Image (spheres, rainbow, N blue to C red):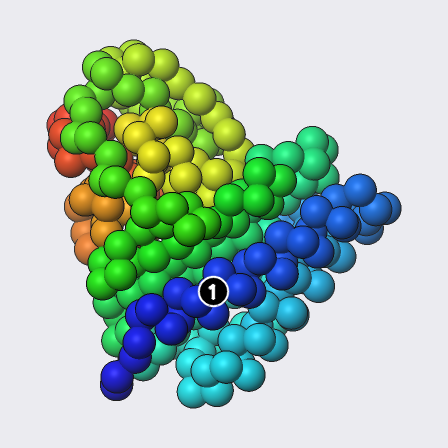
Amino acid sequence: MKVDSKEIDTFLVKLLTQVGETLRENSIKKMSVATKKNRNDLVTNFDKQTERFVNGAIKHAYPDATIVSEEGYGDLVKDMSGLVFFVDPIDGTMNFVKRGDDFASMIGVYIDGEPLNGAIIDVMDNEIYHGGKEIGLFINDKKIDDPKDLPLVEGLVDVSAPMALMDKFSVQDVIKKSSGFRVYGSAGIIFGHLLTGKEVMYMSYLAPWDLAAGRVMCEAAGLNVVSIDGAPINMLESQVVIVGTQKVVSEALKTLKTR
Ligand code: IPD
Ligand code: CA
Ligand code: CA
Ligand code: CA
């Protein structure tokens, strides 16, 4: 299948620009909040509204594509053949509800299983990280350079709160070797930090829509994206993922106790 990465990039940036405008207006309106798996797993009317809007736009522009998305308006995708879009309408819903800041919207695009394009909007800062291996990486219109391959001792790491608290894999040993530890509560916001070298590692249990856009762009930037057990990333399953500089990921894999 022939696809034009530049054309998809233009489409994604236009779409996330519209999503950003709407979410900034909505973040000051009254929202309805419901819980999903537990009391800290939230979904709002705006998560659902955004997903319906984004998925509709994708189906209109790319009728043959399939969509994997969080809130139930996507397709039942069983394999990665053809053009597959991954949609996380609001990433960091807890931040959206409690703080009105540090939340994102993300779209990742894969072709026959290969990472193609990613786009993430930091909604309140109105910054769109976008691009891919073929076209390079940008924040809005500005091209960004690849982050430096820093070692653990020279950088900040971000680990999701549940992962740091349960310390199942001795994550705390990795944290202790770093410059320090941050928890931002939105994978999308953290991918932005990794792409700009503000943090050197992220570790979290991520669903396909949490990972898709960030994986495309982090790999294009020369960062390493691995599943904790060393198995290839499976884009149709949730898994514990480590993303970071080449040096940090290899140090982390040596330090973590994965069995
Ligand atoms: C969550 C956030 C959070 C990460 C969770 C995700 P959501 O996404 O990215 O930082 O630790 O694993 O599920 O549910 O707000 O889209
Ligand atoms: Ca969610
Ligand atoms: Ca998410
Ligand atoms: Ca979400």
Q: Quadrant of the N terminus?
A: bottom left
The residue at 28%/20% (across/down) is 155
Q: Quadrant of the C terminus?
A: top left
Q: Is residue 209 visible?
A: no
> Is residue 119 shown left or right of residue 215?
right
Q: Tell me where residue 94 sits by quadrant.
A: top right
Say what amino acid the circle numbered 1 marks.
Leu
Residue nearest the viewer, comparing 135 with 152: 135
Residue occupying image coordinates x 24% and y 34%: 147
Q: Position of residue 101 (x, y in %)?
A: 64, 35
Q: Quadrant of residue 237?
A: bottom left
Mark 1 falls on what kind of element? helix
Residue of label 1? 12
Asked if ligand 3 lies within 8 A of label 1, the reply is no
Evaluate whether residue 245 shows in this view. yes
Residue 24 or 180: which is nearer the viewer?
A: 24
User: Which residue: 55% across, 52% down?
Assistant: 105
**Image height of 221 relative to 78, above or below:** above
